[in-house]
Image (tube, rainbow, N blue to C red):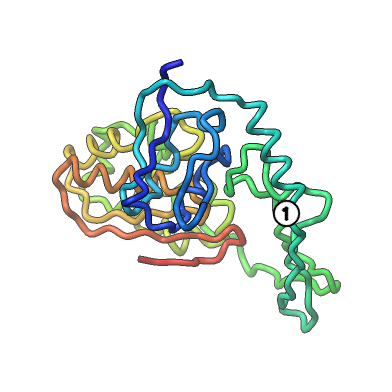
Amino acid sequence: MKRKIVRIDEEKCTGCGLCVDACHEGALQLVDGKARLMSESYCDGLGNCLPECPAGAITIEERNAADFDEGAVKKQMETAKAKSTEKPGSEASCGCGGAESASAPEDVPEKLACGCPGTSARLIERGECAHGAAAPQQAAAPESQLRQWPCQIKLVPVNAPYLDNADLLVAADCTAYAHANIHSDFMRGRITLIGCPKLDDTDYAEKLTEILKAHEIRSIKVLRMEVPCCGGIVNAVKQALIDSGRMIPWGVVTIGTDGRVVEDI
């Protein structure tokens, strides 16, 4: 069957492994320091690994290849999980003077069958810690810093007047739930546009390009999660800047799955 499938240029491949983490099906693995396609039937040809390759070693080509087999993917992911060794929990301070385990609950699978790191199951305890100490009480309810509606990228009108001379926050959906102070830390004074590069069936780059061409945008702050599939929202902003010809100040802040800021560039 002729279909789209991943092609890896081993000469360009540096063995960084970013594509392996980004592949939702586990079709890519590092072998002898190079990324390899382990089976044609594991590759769906969607190319979610493409944006993560800094060396440009991965392309999508159309050729005769075995059909994508979702059942085989699920089976090999379950096999790989069964072979993996359990990681011991690390000790972390909860602020009450005791220590608590940071490991995931034993009865929750580490990842869903698709294998994407973004689906890793993890419980983040809030409020009362494991040692019975209550979390500090909030003095007052914080005020929302959302300055416009709608806020979904695909719903925001390109000609919306509030975009004129605006500082934009382009944020992945999950950041609002992970980072407790997103309103005061990132949304204050900015027009907020949100989306999910993994689940939304749309091209953010096209919409953002139209917005950049139609308005004098002063700056863009991208807020993403640390999981690989969230890199799509960064690539969309980067492509929009290139396609619009507007080289304006922009930066990327990465939020960890526990809500911490892990990188600010």
Q: Amino acid at mark 1?
A: Ser
The front one of 20 and 246 is 20
Left or right: where 168 falls relative to 79: left
Question: Does 155 appear above or below 2?
Answer: below
> In the image, residue 24 lies at what x, y percent?
55, 40
Residue drawn 55% across the image and 66% down it = 260
Mark 1 = which residue?
A: 84
The single residue placed furthest to the right in the displayed view is 132
Q: Position of residue 26 (x, y in %)?
A: 57, 41
The C terminus: image quadrant: bottom left
Q: Position of residue 2 (x, y in %)?
A: 41, 17
Residue 155, above or below 194: above
- Residue 76, above or below 127: above
Residue in view at x 74 percent, y 75 percent: 91
Q: Out of 160 and 6, give the one closest to the viewer.
A: 6
Task: Please report the residue visible at 55 percent of the width from the left and 59 percent of the height from the top.
Answer: 179
Front residue of 230 and 219: 230
Query: Left of 200 or right of it: where is 169?
Result: left
